Image: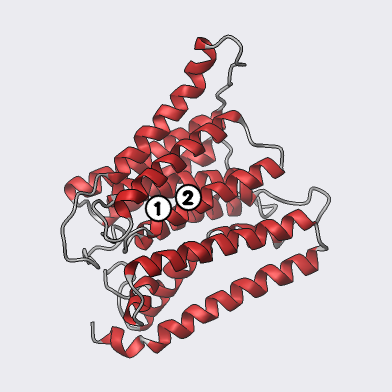
Amino acid sequence: MRNGAETEIIRWASTSKPAFGGISFFILFLFSFALCAIYPQINSEVEAIGINKHQLAILLCSTVGFLIGLADDAYNTKPLLKFSGQLFCGVILLSAGIIIDVTPFRLVNYVFTILWVVGVMNSINMLDNMDGIVSSISGVIILAILVFANMQGKLDPFFFITSLGVVAALIGFLFYNWHPSKMYMGDTGSQFLGAFLSAASIHFIWNLRDVNGPEFQIRQFITPLLVFAIPLIDTTTVSIRRIMRGQSPFVGGKDHITHHMAFLGFKDGTVAFIYLLLSILSASIILFVNMKHWETKYANAISIGYFFVLFMLIQLMYQKNAARHDKK
């Protein structure tokens, strides 16, 4: 289990295991993509699925993410090269018009889009530090994105089929990755998932807004914040704590939230199960709030309140183990 975004490789488990799980994600993703184009030609009763530039951008972005991870697993590439590849993923989405539209200033939106892509790719990468964590949480995020896309009437056959392909790969991988795991996904899997999730979330979640509302809408920020609550809180917490200790956030260590839960006495499988439940709860709350169509001020208050409570509980747990962590 490798913190691939970090320059020093720190493993929670001491046993070396194959890190080929991520390849299966990409293979099923490509198979699902090909199915969208091939199946209508085989079965004349099925309407052809048009592949547009947004879908091609998601394909290319995910492919670049996969190649970044594959190169890092094979050659342990330098962080700058990985960062450059992540920037390129963001540029691909911008060129296809997949942009986070939160301000009237286009340049600000472009920068925000790039930051989100790089941030998600690194968050997913850094979260891959214990058995079953990333694969289970990523599955929940994909399913949440599918529900949001359906709510907006934007769930096209292409994204539905490719997303189900990735979810199926994640479920199959979990049989080998749940504690005690027999296989890791490696950077190949985490970088692919980060690229795919960031692209899909921009396309279907970030632009979830009231067309009759003001230019700046806090709802646009709250929705992805809760869907990605666990990876974002983990990465933010670890990065800030390392900087406060005078360390680089890219230097590896056993100081992630998952590790602190283990220090409290939770077994690895229990930690993964708790993370899965928290991820489901976070996605369910924001979905429930959106489905109820409550007044904006009430919906925002509930969502922000939940995120604040979750964030503070994690900080309290982290602080409780601070002395133990400093000895690591």
Q: Residue at x 44, y 23 (%)?
A: 34
Using residue 276 as the reference point, say whether residue 189 is left or right of it.
left
Q: Is residue 87 visible?
A: no
Q: Which residue is mark 1?
A: 135
The residue sitting at 60% across, 51% down in the picture is 109
Task: Please identify the quarter of the rendering in which residue 307 is found.
Answer: bottom right
Circle 2 packing at 10 Å, graded few (<14), some (14-19), many (20+), is many
Q: Label 1 is placed on what type of residue?
A: Ser
- Look at the numbered disc 2 and give the secondary structure of its residue: helix
Label 2, on which residue?
A: 139
The front one of 100 and 252 is 252
> Residue 87's spot in the image, x, y percent?
41, 48
How far separated are the C-alphas under marks 1 and 2? Answer: 6 Å
> Does residue 3 sit above or below 320 in this rendering?
above
Compared to 184, does 93 lie above or below?
above
Q: Quadrant of residue 131?
A: bottom left
